[in-house]
Image (tube, rainbow, N blue to C red):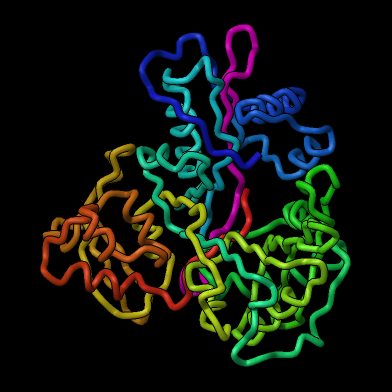
Amino acid sequence: MNHPGTRDEPTSGLEDIHIRRVADEEFDAYGQAIEAAFGSELSPARLELERSTYEPDRFLGAFTAQGEIVGSSGAFSFELALPGGTTAGCAGVTAVAVRQDHRRRGLLTAMMLRLLEQADERGEPFAALWASEGGIYGRYGFGPAIPTTRIEVARDRLVLRDPVATDEVRVIDATAAVGLVGELYGRARSQRPGLLSRSAAWWHRLLVHDPADERDGAGPRTIAVLRDGGYVVYRLQPHWERDVPCGTVRVEELVSLHPQATAQLWTFLAATDLAVTIMAPGRPTDDPLRSMVVDPAHVHVRSGSPVYLRILDVPAALAARHYPVDERIVLDVTDRLFPERSGTFEVVVSDGVAQVTPTDADADLALGIEELGMLYLGGVRPTMLRQAGRVEQRRSDAVARCERLLAWDQAPMQCSEF
């Protein structure tokens, strides 16, 4: 139920709507109500899958006096990987929908406020979401913080400048893969900011659960592992034209721990029979494939859907990550949704660790909470936001200092929806 959300403008009261937790016996109806808002429905098997990761105390329904479910919202409990290998609690906002005949009455705003307040009460400095309509969430303080790209390359054009052997890559059974893939993913999280923690239920959902009616015409999931190097999860979508195979390799997730492993996993994908094209969405902006191949013109890269990040506790968030340089900067942060959390904060970094305190000192840089979320993981540059008129430089070198401070050597990444 990874659908944050449908548009709703607050223009009238909610006197006849009650927002509350969803009872266990209401779960099936709740799940179907969410899917109906997006034009689909859940099979019994899919309902059981959704139940496996469902957190009852974090999901809300909007009910009419007659008991109809006209709105939904929820959150999963994750740990977000931060620059420097640290982690912090993050509410994974999901299942946000309002039935069409109840929009523009403030339901979305009421539910979002409850979710964000609950996350703050739980000590989570962050909330994150994938947006089906990205224009909705800026007013709630979410900014696109993890840009993604979609890579498409013809299989016969994926020729590396420095060829590598793939003898050590092994295809393994999904159930057996969970432990090994989980360990490799955990090591990747210490290197790559943006990746979220995964429970056993999430690993089962992402690797083991694979009914034929949910594959969109593709074959079963294949999991190939390079021990101590990484893994790739993919499918072959077969297609034939005049008896000639011209299928597509659909990459669901590719995680590598070093450049050699990256080369080996892409080379392994290029050896897939019956395919002519490899499609890999959800890649980080620093994916090195174009720099690894003989002819980069044949590696087509376009922007994908970003992950949106919301900072709920500015001092805690800024103190949680590591920094590549020592620096002092004063930030004036405006939070329109929670004005009481606005303020001016002095950030003093020593040996990569920040001390963050409220201050009355003059600010070097002024920005909104949405913009701070965009910059936080290093996926968006402060100079870009300044050129867009979204940050105010109050000292002449503030943007340059902020850029050096928030940069990281690996772009943030989030490769699966939630």
When the figure is inspected, residue 383 is found, relative to residue 112, above or below; the finding is below
Q: Position of residue 310 (x, y in %)?
A: 42, 49
Q: Residue 7: horizontal and vertical position, in percent?
A: 46, 29
Tell me where residue 29 appears, x and y as whole percent.
72, 23
In magenta stretch: residue 69: yes
The answer to whether 286 appears left or right of 372 in the picture is right
In the visual, does 299 lie left or right of 360? Answer: right
- Give the residue displayed 20% in from the left and 63% down from the top: 330
- Image coordinates of residue 315 in percent, x first then y, are 34, 57
Residue 403 vertical position relative to residue 34 in the rendered view, above or below: below
| Residue occupying image coordinates x 78% and y 42% | 49
Q: Is residue 332 visible?
A: no
Q: Farthest residue toward the bottom?
A: 162
Residue 113 lies in quadrant: top left
Residue 342 in magenta stretch? no
Viewport quadrant of the N terminus = top right
**Side of 293 relative to 135 (left or right):** right
**How many numbered marks, from 0 up?**
0
Q: Which quadrant of the view contains residue 76? A: top right
The answer to whether any part of residue 48 appears in the image is yes
Q: Is residue 407 left or right of residue 54?
A: left
Instruction: Please name the residue shown 27% across and 58% down the image.
Output: 385
Q: Main secondary structure of the magenta part?
A: strand
From which residue to which does the magenta span run? 61-86
Is 395 or 218 nearer to us in this picture? 218
